[in-house]
Image (tube, rainbow, N blue to C red):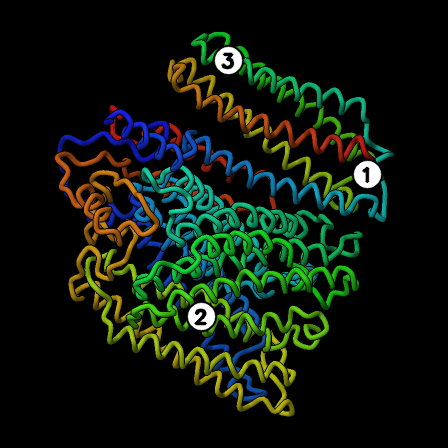
Amino acid sequence: MAHAAAAVAADDHGQTNTGISNWKLGFWAFIASECLFFGTLISVYMVYKGAAITGPYPNEIFDVLKTTVSTTILLFSSLAMVLALDQVIKANKKKAILWLAAVILMGAAFLVMEYTSYLKYISYGLTLGSSTFGSSYYVLTGTHKLHVVIGMIWMATLIWLIARDRIPPHKSETVEIAGLYWHFVDIIWIVIFTLVYLIQ
Amino acid sequence: MSSVGTVTPDVHHTSHEEDTGLWSWITTVDHKRIAIMYFVTATVFFFVGGFEALLIRIQLMNPEQNLISPELYNQLFTMHGTTMIFLVAMPMAVAFFNYVVPLQIGARDVAFPRLNALSYWIFLFGGIYLNASFFVGAAPNASWVGYATLTLPEFSPGRNVDFWFIGLSILGVASIVGGVNFITTIINMRAPGMKMMRMPLFTWMTLVTSFLLITAIPVIGVALVFLGFDRLFGTVFFNPAGGGDPVLWQHLFWIFGHPEVYILILPAFGVISDVIPAFSKKPLFGYPIVVYAGILIGFIGWGVWSHHMFTVGLGPIADSFFVAATMIIAIPTGVKIFNWIATMWGGSLQFTTAMLFCVGLVAVFTVGGLSGIMHASAPVNLQQHDSYFVVAHFHYVIVGGAMMGLWAGLYYWFPKVCGRYLDETLGKWHFWTTMIGFNLTFFPMHFSGLFGMPRRIFTYSADLNVDIYNQLSTVGAFIFGLSAIIMTWNLIRSWRSGEPAPANPWGAPHLEWSIPSPPHHYNFPGIPEVRSREPLWDPKERADIEAVTMAEPEREPIMPNPSWVPICLAAAITLAWALVMTGVWWIIILGMLPVLFFTFLWAFEPAFPEGH
């Protein structure tokens, strides 16, 4: 009887929270907010698509092949992120640090490639103020790069914490949430890559 | 940090006295103290915004006056609108979210107490930053909607608009952080048995509002980023000379702006949905319908923004869609009105001040709703756009709706906050001066507007024949101002020496009334179990709950550590944004370093006492 009552109470409590931690739930809410942020940036790019009154125009300057390479690197960084989390859960400190370092390196490679592309576009005459295409392209992709940089700082912090044994397996959620962020930044890039580079 | 549910249930070994010094307020992470700070700050800004309104009314009392220069007038009406919306109505509602929601759901605090403190300090610093513009003679002057191209450097060369877009960006950060916090708190931290469909309506509307906050604020965030880039870095988002489209600003602003209207009104709807049943001694009529109507308003609120833009000329198809959507959103709102009336129907009504404000809201808000439906029609709208008719309309819904609802909540929850009643005699003076002053100010504006008096112009011609309406409005505004002074006097007097109030002074049904007034800093000695929607109205359930909530705990529950990091991080965020004004890349990047520094301090600071 007492057992049954306890079971009922437990069941009741199950309906008054989601069973996932506050941090993770809060972070999902934050990502929802970020979706609207990027959603607006992407929408404005799409609204202004083909509306630039002066060149250069997208089809004249975009190097789809090069961007495909940088995109692939960024996507593989997500794989490294997953493996890093797996190693944290398995309490394998060295491998966890290695995979997180790989995430940072791939993020850096992505940023360097994109930066050289920026320089090339600028040399073609595409600047922040040259046209609505320039404005919406640079602010959209620039915002994304800022997110990548923040993610890299976050990963570096995690490496430091893991090295000092401050993320034991039962605290792996710290890494998991950083992973949520990183995957989100990647997914946004897939959308940008498709809408901005592939469908010109 | 414990994994799920309420704040960690471990208990402290020594009972400690609560600090009350200034430092304890600066470092507090207690949702109740943060609520009080929100309320006091918003009230101060209410007086600032009210003072601006009185100056406007003095200038408009007679035609062709020159008491205030057109330049100053532009700053006054811009800052009046911006202040009342972002620094009064929104944070005042957040004050109530903070105080009431954890108590209503049986939680010891919100999900992220330090983030909660961060929200408050960002709001305070953002508000100070925005108003500091007056002291350098460059207060925002392009109206609270800041339409491009007026806001571009060519037409607004001063720093005025920079203060505006940066100030709103800072405040936006506070809103998103707050929204995330309350969503997590409400979804994840309810007491056992408090299913979603047993939550009090105020908690429900806080949830809907929080979702609107985290989804609507990013949109204006992007719009403000574009505006900043256009002003400081030469982009052409809104600049027609470079191929940009000024109408894009209007779309982005109102895609945020219309959900914002519901961010303002839904908390008030939540308040009166709790207050009316308490003073009718009847459960809320059609509880699920009121909940669903609130959710529906939240959804449809996203699909009506272009009704602010009928004069732009978007074409008959777009206009028709937004006319229809706007009229549809009147339905769930009307449903709520009927539910409140049906709740009162046949109840044993007690007309306390709180109840009077509820009834006042139902009456006055309905007037505003009706004028809203009038200009929902595009052809009619063309006549009324940018006239004082619109000014009348939105004051009826924001003051008559949002603010009156919050004042109802003030009289209702004040005894819980400090264990004393607000004085009922002064309260009735407050209510009646509000009703008379408010209606005398804004009802005549329907007429001055329809006779052709435009908004946002520092004076008007005597030929318009609207002198009498403006004089009535000015007299009304001063009576309304008097009501604010009465309210403040009542607050100060009752805080010090009001009549002591018991735990449940109104015989109300929800959990916040099951604990002592004022509550312990840990709210609930033990977490009660809820079995129904009106737990305290069932004698058996009430006895079970109070056995837990009124008990003296042997050892005090562990509460989060106080922290000085939130105020520092908030200052760093404000500074970083303020430096954007320089328009110099390296200064802006340097400005981000303190943010990074305090973020690290934050991350490595233990949230709970050692060993927990």
Crowd tier of the residue under label 1, counting other residues whose Cα lies within 10 Å: few below 14, some 14–19, many 20 or above = some
Quadrant placement of the C terminus of chain B: top left
Q: Residue at x 40, y 68 (%)?
A: B404
- Closest to the camera, between mark 2 and mark 3, is 2
Q: Residue at x 59, y 87 (%)?
A: B64
Q: Quadrant of residue A185?
A: top right
Crowd tier of the residue under label 3, counting other residues whose Cα lies within 10 Å: few below 14, some 14–19, many 20 or above = some
Q: Quadrant of residue B498?
A: bottom left
Q: Could one spot residue B436 in this view of the protein?
A: yes
Against B108, residue B469 (above or below) is: below
Q: Quadrant of residue B327?
A: bottom right
Say what amino acid the circle numbered 3 marks: Asp
Q: Earlier in the sequence, mark 1 or mark 3?
A: 3
Q: What residue is pinned by disc 3?
A: A86
Q: Chain of mark 2?
A: B
Q: Residue at x 25, y 23 (%)?
A: B611
Q: Is B341 on the left or on the right of B395, as rendered? A: left
- Closest to the camera, between mark 1 and mark 3, is 3
Q: Nearer the viewer, residue B237 or A180?
A: A180
Measuring from the top left, give residue B544's x and y in whole percent: 20, 43
Callout 3: SS: helix
Say what amino acid the circle numbered 1 marks: Gly
Quadrant placement of the N terminus of chain B: top left
Q: Nearer the viewer, residue B354 or A196?
A: B354
Measuring from the top left, give residue B542's x and y in whole percent: 22, 48
Q: Are marks 2 and 1 in contact (CB under 8 Å)?
A: no
Q: What residue is pinned by disc 1?
A: A125
Q: Is A52 on the left or on the right of B562, as rendered? A: right
Q: What residue is pinned by disc 2?
A: B362
